[in-house]
Amino acid sequence: MTFITDDKARIKGRREAINVVYNAHNKTVFSVVPVDAKVKTLFAERNVNVNFDHVLTGIDADRKAARYKTPEGEVWQDYDFIHVIPPMCAPDAVRNSSLPWQSGVFAADAWVEADKASLRHPRFPNVFAVGDIAGVPRGKTAASVKWQVPVVVDHIVADIAGKTSTAVYNGYTSCPMITRYGKAMLIEFDYDGKLVPSFPFIDPLEELWVSWLIDEKALLGTYRAMLFGRA
């Protein structure tokens, strides 16, 4: 959203008239080190101001002001337009069950307890978790599910046959990042934060038209085909 806002203003010849601010809730703008460095570089080149350790705690819509908790104390920032990503947690059906983590970093948001490699629940071995609900370090993307499901299926089939599966989910996550109209970075990484590109001819840290095409056209077509039962 930050990149698109910047690019839209440039296209309209109005970039000098606006101040773009990105408030990060922690000390980075992206959890993967090389991507974090790249985005910081692009933000600096495009005059996007970044504030770290700014946790949104409230919005006064009448004043058009947002309140943040910072290490220095509470601060308010005025805005004309604000785009917010809210905190996320498991739905009540899961939260009020025995499935969530009972302790650790995933407990507060009630994600389903799961072994990060097999995606199997350690207390309920006939339960597996995939997608957004899975309490694993990565994997909350549609692309992750595509890699997670075969692992789970392999384990279920092995259980039925009285065997043991060795299938492992490595944390694969895909995050196509649109950096301007018509260009994107196709970022893919694993549990260790290592970049694992699917296409050797695509540099994951370069703004490319083909990466934008994959995100905006190819994947959209795939989703449409899935919706109509053709994939």
Image (cartoon, rainbow, N blue to C red):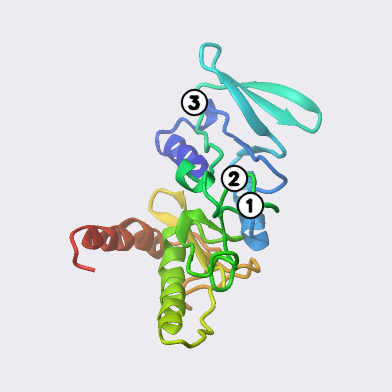
Q: Amino acid at mark 1?
A: Phe
Mark 2, other Cα within 10 Å: few <14 / some 14–19 / many ≥20 = some
- In the figure, 211 relative to 4: above or below? below
Mark toward the start of the polypeptide (1 vs 3):
3
Tell me where residue 15 appears, x and y as whole percent.
50, 33
- Residue 33: give x, y in percent of width and height: 68, 60
Above or below residue 152? Residue 33 is above
Q: Secondary structure at mark 3?
A: loop
Q: Amino acid at mark 2?
A: Asp
Q: Residue at x 62, y 52 (%)?
A: 30
Give the residue pinned by disc 1: 106
Q: Residue at x 54, y 73 (%)?
A: 118
Q: Are marks 2 and 1 in contact (CB under 8 Å)?
A: yes
Q: 14 and 149: which one is in front?
A: 149
Q: Quadrant of residue 55?
A: top right
The percent coordinates of residue 102 (x first, y second) are 65, 52
| Residue at x-position 44% and y-position 84% | 158
Q: Mark 3 highlights which residue?
A: 81
Secondary structure beneath disc 2?
A: loop
Mark 2–mark 1 Cα distance, whole angstroms, equals 6 Å
Q: In this image, 75 relative to 212: left or right?
A: right
**Residue designated by label 2:** 109
